[in-house]
Image: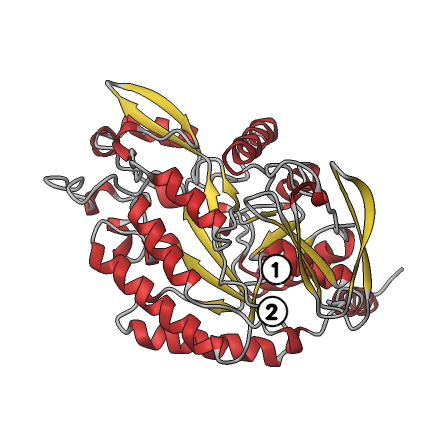
Amino acid sequence: MIRPRVALACVVAALAGLLAVAFGLGSDRAAVDWSAQRAVVLESDDWGLAGFVPDGGAWEGLERQALAPGRFPDVYWGSTLEDSAQVADLAAVLAGVRGRDGLPAVLQPNYIMGALDLVDGRWRESRLPDLPDRYRRDGLWPAVDAALAAGVWHPEYHGAWHYDPALRRERVATDPLSRQAAERGILLFEGSEGAWELGPWRPLPVLEAELARGIADFRRCFGRPPAAVIAPDYTWDGRIETLWVDHGLRVIQGKREQQHPRRSSGAPGRLLKVLERRWSKLTRPGLTYLERNCRFEPVQAADPAAVTAACVAQIRRAWARGEPAVVETHRVNFVHTDPAVAALGRDQLAGLLAEVAVDGPVFLTDAEVAQLGRRGVSARPLADGRTLLRNAARSRRAVAVSGTAGTGLVMLPAGAVVVLPAGSGEGPASVPAEVDLFD
C-alpha cells in the first residue's frame, strides 16, 4: 500500500519533471541573433471590423451604459471602421521612417472578415471587401491597395466576426436596448464583452466553416493566404490551434495573453497556463508563437507621451534580451469618430518610430520573424508580385524559388536583403515567386 506522503512525493516529482521538460526542452532557440537584428513588429488588431459604431451620432438619445455591453476603455465608445483618409494618413507615417535596410516601417493590420447588419428587422451578412451599408467608406480599398503597394501594409488574420453571431442574434431578439443599438448599426449588445467568437461552447464544425470561409475571403481581398493569426479577445483553446494549423496558419500571436474561460484564475490556473504554453511549443513544432512584449495604446491613457516613452523602453529591453520587439497596438489608436483621437495616435506613432529609428532597426512581419527564427532566412510577398528575401544568418544561405520561370536556387550572402521580380523574373507582375520557408 502506498503511503500518502510517498504518493504526494511522487506527484511533486512528476510535476517537477514536467516543469523541467516544459522549461528546458521547450525553451526557444532562434537561428539568428535577435539582439543584433533589432527587429520591430507592429501588430494591430480589429481592422475591417464594422464597429463599434458607424459614426459619431450613433449614440444620440441611447443610454449606452444601460446597454451593459461589458467593461472597456472609454475611447472605444467612438471606435469605428477605418476610412480612406485614415488609412492614407497612417500609411504616410509608416512610409516616413526607414529601417537600416532602407525599407519603410510596416504595419501588420489583423483583419476581421465578416459583419452582421440588422436591416428592416432582418439580418444581412457582409464579407470583406463588402461592408454593411452604414459602414460604407468611399475609397477605402484603393487606399489599402496604395498602402500595400508602398510596402507599409501587411494584413494578417484576426477572425470571422469578433463575437459569437448566434449570441448577438439572441440578445438582439430578447433585449430591446440591444435591438435599438443594432438598428443603428452599433455592434455592441448586452453581454457582448463575453460573447467570444472562439468560445468553448461554439460547435467545432461551425468554427471550421467560418475559418475556411474567412481565409478564402482574405485571399480574395489581399491576393495571398494569411500566415499569422490573433484570436479575438485573446480567447481560444487547443482545438482552435488544431484548426489553425490545418488551414495553414503557422504563426500564433499573443500566446502569453491567451484566456481560458473554463480555467481557474488563481495560482493553479496560472501554473497550468504556463505549462500548457510550453507544452504547446513542444508538441506543435510546426507552429511559431510570437509574444507581444511591447504595448502601444496611447489614446487609452491620460498621458499618451508617457505610453510612447514606455513603449520605446520596452522595445530596447526586448532587443537587450535577445528578442524581436513585438508591439501590440489596436486600430482605435488610429481610427476614431473623433478626428483628434486618430491624429493623436498617429502623432504618437510618428514619435515612437522616430525614436527607435536612431537605433537602426529593421521592420518585419510575423511570418518573417518566424522564418528567420527557424531558418535564418525569410520571404515576404509584396503587393506587386515581387518577393522580399532576407538572410539574417551569419553565413550564405540557398533559397529555393519557384515561379513562371521555373525552379531554382537563390544564393543569399549573410545580411543580404534582395527583392525578386514577379514570377522569379519572367512572369506577369501579378504572379509572385513561391518561397516556403516554414517546416
Residue 314, horizontal then vertical, whole percent: 49, 76
Residue 336, horizontal then vertical, whole percent: 27, 51
Q: Kindly indicate whether the residue at mark 2 contacts the one at mark 1 (C-beta within 8 angstroms).
A: yes
Provide the secondary structure element on which disc 2 rests.
loop
Q: Is residue 388 above or below residue 249?
A: below
> Which residue is under mark 1?
290
Q: Mark 1 or 2, which is nearer the eye?
A: 2
- Mark 1 belongs to which amino acid? Leu
Who is closer to the viewer here, 48 or 25?
48
> Disc number at residue 321?
none
* Relative horizontal placement of residue 122, taking residue 278 as reference (left or right): left
Instruction: Quadrant for residue 94, please give it.
Output: bottom left
Label 1 to label 2: alpha-carbon separation? 9 Å
Who is closer to the viewer here, 424 or 109?
424
Query: Residue at position x 26%, y 21% from top?
Result: 119
Query: Residue at position x 26%, y 37% from top?
Result: 186
Q: Quadrant of the N terminus?
A: bottom right
Provide the secondary structure element on which disc 1 rests.
strand
The answer to whether residue 5 is visible is: yes
* Relative horizontal placement of residue 37, taking residue 119 as reference (left or right): right
* Relative horizontal placement of residue 209, taking residue 70 as reference (left or right): right
User: Which residue in the rendered view is the most extreme toward the front?
Assistant: 426
Who is closer to the viewer here, 436 or 333?
436
Q: Is residue 374 above or below residue 219?
A: below
Choose the circle earlier in sequence order: 1 or 2: 1
Who is closer to the viewer here, 64 or 347?
347
> Which residue is under mark 2?
324
